[in-house]
Amino acid sequence: MCGILEYMTLYDDAGGFDALLALCRRWHDLCLADPVAAHPFSHPGQHPQHDERLAAYLAEALGGPPLYTAGYGDESLVQRMHAGNGEHHELDEICLRLFDRALEDTAVPAHAAARISRYFRTATEAMGRYSASRGLVPAGLPLNRA
């Protein structure tokens, strides 16, 4: 390495895109199987590539390539997709618990899983900022990074 240290991102620690896509798919399946969490994952209009888009978002947020902003949109778009649904603390907690289970089920290394879990909780809580209306979301928000 010629004395140069390689910098490993959380994206790298998690196992890269394939690991994140497996995580998103497992989380989606767990949510669909839960009577409370199923609602937002089974409503009409659910994007057919939800898992791929979420994996692209997580990849970028965790220090990987700019897959989300290069192909799908920006943070303002993400916030608007989730805004205007009122507060739903019980649903959030169930989904966060299922996300942690998906982290375990997909064998994301424990040191990375703990950091990803904390990031995902923070990102989920940040979405509550715009729970009253999509119109509250400003344009040009920077991606919510870990």
Image: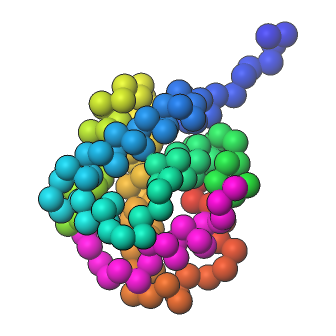
> Dividing the picture into quarters, in which one does residue 122 lie?
bottom left
| Magenta region, residue range | 71-89
Q: Can residue 140 be seen at all in this image of the molecule?
A: yes
- Residue 77: where, in percent of width, then height? 59, 71
| Residue positioned 49% across, 37% down in the render | 20
Q: Is residue 100 above or below residue 127?
A: above
Q: Can residue 129 be seen at all in this image of the molecule?
A: no
Q: How is the image coloured?
A: rainbow
| Residue positioned 54% across, 67% down in the render | 78
- Residue 18: where, in percent of width, then height? 53, 31
Check if residue 140 falls in the magenta segment. Answer: no
Check if residue 80 falls in the magenta segment. Answer: yes
Q: Tell whether 45 sits left or right of 1.
A: left
Task: Decide which of 121, 86 is in the foreground and name it.
Answer: 86
Q: Is residue 83 above or below residue 52?
A: below
- Residue 124: where, in percent of width, then height? 40, 62
Judged from this view, the residue extending furthest toward the top is 2
Judged from this view, the residue extending furthest toward the right is 2
Quadrant, the N terminus:
top right
> Dividing the picture into quarters, in which one does residue 70 lie?
bottom right
Task: Decide which of 28, 11 is in the foreground and name it.
Answer: 28
Q: How many numbered marks have been drawn onto this rendered protein structure?
A: 0
Q: Is residue 37 above or below residue 108?
A: below
| Residue positioned 84% across, 10% down in the render | 2
- Residue 31: where, in percent of width, then height? 26, 52
> Dividing the picture into quarters, in which one does residue 75 lie?
bottom right
Task: Decide which of 128, 40 is in the foreground and name it.
Answer: 40
